[in-house]
Amino acid sequence: MRDRCGMRRMRRWLCRSGSVFALVLVLLAGSAPGAELPPRGALLTLEQCREIAWEHQPELRAGFQNVLAGQARVGQERAARYPQLGAESSYRRSSEVSRASSGAEREVSSEYSHQLGASQLLYDFGRTKARVRRRRLEAESLQADLEDMRERINFAVREAYFVVLKAQRDWQVAVETVRQYEDHLRQAKGFFEAGVKPRFDVTKAEVDLSRARLELITAENAVRLARVRLNNAMGVPDAPDYRLEDILERQFEHVSLETVLERALRNRADLRALDLRKQSLDEALKAAKAGHYPHLDGVALYRWIGEEHPLDREWQVGAAVTLPLFTGLRTRHEVLEARANRKAEEAREDALKQAIILEAQHAWLNLHEAQERIGTARLAVRQASENFDIAQGRYRTGVGNPIEVTDAQVAYADARNMLTGALYDYQIAVAALERVMGKK
């Protein structure tokens, strides 16, 4: 029930804030059918895994609470624009001893006081306006941070998804390799019992089969570890068993490096967050400079006072000017701090831009390398398959030897795993490229 109430609050605030991204995020996380945990044995797509992560990743919930906190700070600063009302009530009882000709006398008196006061900021040379704008820009930067967090989670889920697909294909190769070595062992035993082949062929086949079974154990554990990683990326470590749609062969359109760099510098949420923080520091500098100037307030007071009821009444209306003559150089140092923070943010922005350019170049080059490797790996699989068929045929006819069969089998398995590795690297390169471009 608490989560549902929190989701409603998220929707209400996001509708007011006008954030298209965040509204879509919450609607997907709160209402998409794929956001629920899948039943055992269900077939999940990559998109469904992302939706599960949006619903269950605690990082996203923490990020959204940071956005709400930032929005609350806007309201705190905006409060200075509105009238400030206050009430005060007091009672005082005192005694006074006076000396008279007739002797000492004690006089006891009481005083009641009740008052209502109001003040209204009239003008402060833009200090409050700058503070409100600063907090608003900080809240927007936190929202951009939330979007960047979502993109990082998307990439983590996507990477873990393809790790599972790669591990499953490697496991399939290991299963088939064990089956092929079992067939070869049966052939070797048959030839040995018929007196056609020596005992060496049998022992060699047994050794190869044991090695293949060990590799199968490793492959099975790799699948389990990959699923654990995907569950963690989705934020559901106790997810029931499920199947994944195999999209390892999916291809994507070519994008030039210039386009990648242009989109990366335009769309990245973390870069946008830095720019918003830089703008907020500009406003912080304005607010700090305004501390050198006076501020004008309107004040009003209505008071009831007296020793007994009914109390006397009085009221006051006026204006007050507060001029900071000397504050221990506090304002000057606030200005220096704001300027230093602004320059530091500029340096961080430059560093991030350089990191984004480097990341984009790496992803683009890795993508093209993986594309070339896929073509070569497919050719290697065809060649290794043909070579394995030839080696098996030679052995069945009594011409070949077990070493030829083993070498051909190892080469065939390695070629298939290399193709899987190339396909995996291609998908990860595509994911990294879309991540660096800030693609939703």
Image (cartoon, rainbow, N blue to C red):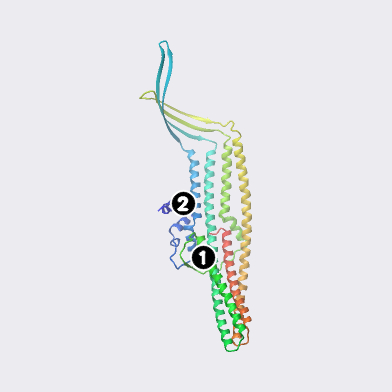
| Label annotation for residue 129 | none
Quarter of the view holding residue 286: top right
Residue 369 x %, y % = 63, 67
**What residue is pinned by disc 1?**
227
Question: Which amino acid type is marked by label 2?
Answer: Leu
Q: Nearer the viewer, mark 1 or mark 2?
A: 1
Taking the image as shown, residue 125 lies to the left or right of residue 36, namely right
Residue 123 x %, y % = 52, 35
Residue drawn at 44 percent across, 57 percent down: 30
Extreme residue toward the left, this view: 310
Residue drawn at 57 percent across, 32 percent down: 324
**What residue is pinned by disc 2?**
14
Residue drawn at 57 percent across, 60 percent down: 435
Taking the image as shown, residue 8 lies to the left or right of residue 405, namely left
Q: Residues within 10 Å of mark 1 (few under 14, many from 20)?
A: many
Q: Earlier in the sequence, mark 1 or mark 2?
A: 2
